[in-house]
Amino acid sequence: MKKWIAGARLPTLPAAIVPVLVGTAAAGMPYHLDRALLAGVVALALQVGVNFANDYSDGIRGTDKNRTGPMRLVASGLATPAAVLRAAVIAFAIAAVAGIALSLQVDAWLIAVGFSAIAAAWFYTGGPKPYGYNGLGEVFVFIFFGLVGTLGSTYVQHGSFTVVSALASLAVGSLTTALLVVNNLRDIPGDEATGKRTLAVKMGDGATRRLYLALLAAAALATLAVVVLHPWALVAFIAAAAAIRPVQIIRSGATGRALVPVLVDTGRLELAFGVLFAASVGVGR
């Protein structure tokens, strides 16, 4: 059980939880908690599914051999590729069932959005031409875990979007993308050695560090725009305290395993932001 929990990569789960929290709060009352719960199941199952799918795909390609980050099941030999693939399929199946149930309550066309998210999760590192190996991972993460996740969570509440949710989706997307950026920054040496052309590999170490800082700044600016509409959202800036250590480490030039705490801290930053934003906007509305 411990190895499967580790393989699910818990530090990345805020990327799934936060869009639902923020998007639901931005929809305004009355809240449909059953729909929010289903949206949460979809998001969490997708995140776990993509983590296992990446473990499987990277493992069978051999691109995890020189990995400096957290343990991977296939590369470490703790689980067979077939078992990890099965775990990914089960997670995606849970996401599909919950997503279909949610879509039938709101709009059937959302089913197509859900399956496009599953496809994006699989082809990140799976298939003959994974887009994650060509520097497009950050773009898809911003779209699906930022815009789609947040705006989708708003839409399933009342069948419409709000200006607040649109601005909030930019903040959430920026923070979630920052998670992937620091992950790929840490893995530059190993990815270069195995021919994995992530955005970090293409941009280089220095530019990737600047991108990470820019994403945190973008999240702050988007939140500041929400404050103009809902002053209570200013409370979300308390989460900025969680950014102090990761920013210092990034600016210090740390590499390899020294960057692992940045991944954990960025996840905590996003989770803190999500909880504070959702609570403050919910009160303000």
Image: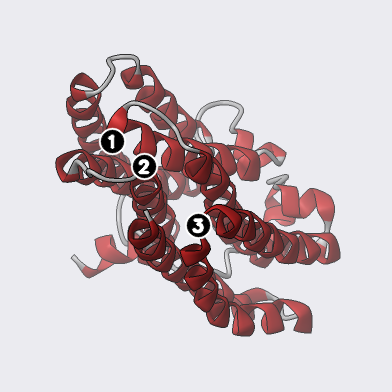
Identity of the amino acid at label 3? Answer: His
* 77 shown above or below 51: below
Among the 4 quarters of the image, the one containing residue 131: top right
Q: Residues within 10 Å of mark 1 (few under 14, many from 20)?
A: many
Q: Secondary structure at mark 3?
A: loop
Identity of the amino acid at label 2? Answer: Ala
The residue drawn where x is 21% and y is 40% is 38
Q: Residues within 10 Å of mark 2 (few under 14, many from 20)?
A: many
* 129 shown above or below 189: above
Closer to us: 225 or 251:
225
* Residue 4 x %, y %: 26, 60
Identity of the amino acid at label 1? Answer: Gln
Closer to us: 195 or 116:
116
Residue 230 has which mark?
3
For the residues labelled 3 and 2, the Cα–Cα distance comes to 13 Å
The residue drawn where x is 46% and y is 46% is 54
- Position of 230 with respect to 66 (left or right) is left
Colouring convention used in this rendered image of the protein: secondary structure
For the residues labelled 3 and 1, the Cα–Cα distance comes to 20 Å
* Residue 42 x %, y %: 28, 40
Of label 2 and label 1, which has the lower sequence position? 2
- On-image quarter of the N terminus: bottom left
Q: Which residue is mark 2?
A: 27
Q: Which residue is mark 1?
A: 157
